[in-house]
Image (cartoon, rainbow, N blue to C red):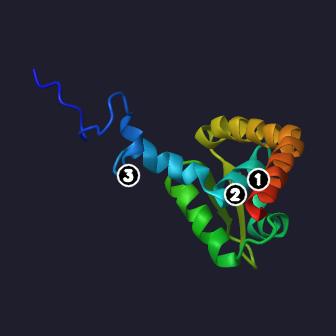
Amino acid sequence: MDTKVWPPLPKEGLLPMYFAACPTRQVLDRIGDKWSVLVIGLLAGETLRFSQLKRCIDGISQKMLTQTLRHLERDGLIERTLYAEVPPRVEYALTPLGASLGGLIQALQQWADENIGEVTAAQARYDARAEE
């Protein structure tokens, strides 16, 4: 039986997800994207329209929001519902798979809120050393 690991590991015990071609890595890249995290966080527990998402996420362009929503839909994390109205109404909601991720993202947001003081203090110390 062949016990070789694909792809060959440069370091003993290194998980395949550290390689770009690993499907797990590709999923982590998607859900770790800053815009994806924000969209999933907003959709946790409620359905929103495109314009509501755009208003809530400061700094995101219409193009980037559109791309992010398409990627998340393709990955099965959100569902897009188009209503045949004039003008057309489109709503976005988390799928059950996306909702399972929503709780993890909310936990990350809570961690960031609870630890922002320590992070900014560390940044200030680092910046002070860099200026010396």
Asked if the residue at tag 1 contacts the one at tag 3, i.e. Cβ–Cβ closer than 8 Å, the answer is no
Q: Which residue is mark 3?
A: 20
31 lies left or right of 86:
left
Position of 51 relative to 123 (above/below): below
Q: Which residue is situated farthest in the left direction here?
A: 1
Name the residue nearer the viewer: 8 or 103.
8
Q: Which residue is mark 2?
A: 92
The residue type indicated by label 2 comes to: Tyr
- Distance from Cα at disc 2 to Cα at disc 3: 29 Å
Q: Residues within 10 Å of mark 3 (few under 14, many from 20)?
A: few
Position of 87 relative to 125 (above/below): below
Q: Nearer the viewer, mark 2 or mark 3?
A: 3
Q: Which residue is situated farthest in the front direction here?
A: 132
Counting residues from the start of the chain, the first of labels 3 and 1 encountered is 3
Residue 45 x %, y % = 79, 43
Residue 53 x %, y % = 78, 64
Position of 46 relative to 6 (above/below): below
User: In the image, which disc is placed on residue 26?
Assistant: none
The residue type indicated by label 1 comes to: Tyr
Residue 87 x %, y % = 75, 79
Q: Residue at point 25% right, 41% down?
A: 7
Q: Nearer the viewer, mark 3 or mark 1?
A: 1
Name the residue nearer the viewer: 118 or 102.
118
68 lies left or right of 47:
left
Q: Nearer the viewer, mark 2 or mark 1?
A: 1
Q: Residue at point 87% right, 37% down?
A: 114
- Distance from Cα at disc 3 to Cα at disc 1: 31 Å
Q: Which residue is mark 1?
A: 126
116 lies left or right of 49:
right
- Distance from Cα at disc 2 to Cα at disc 1: 41 Å
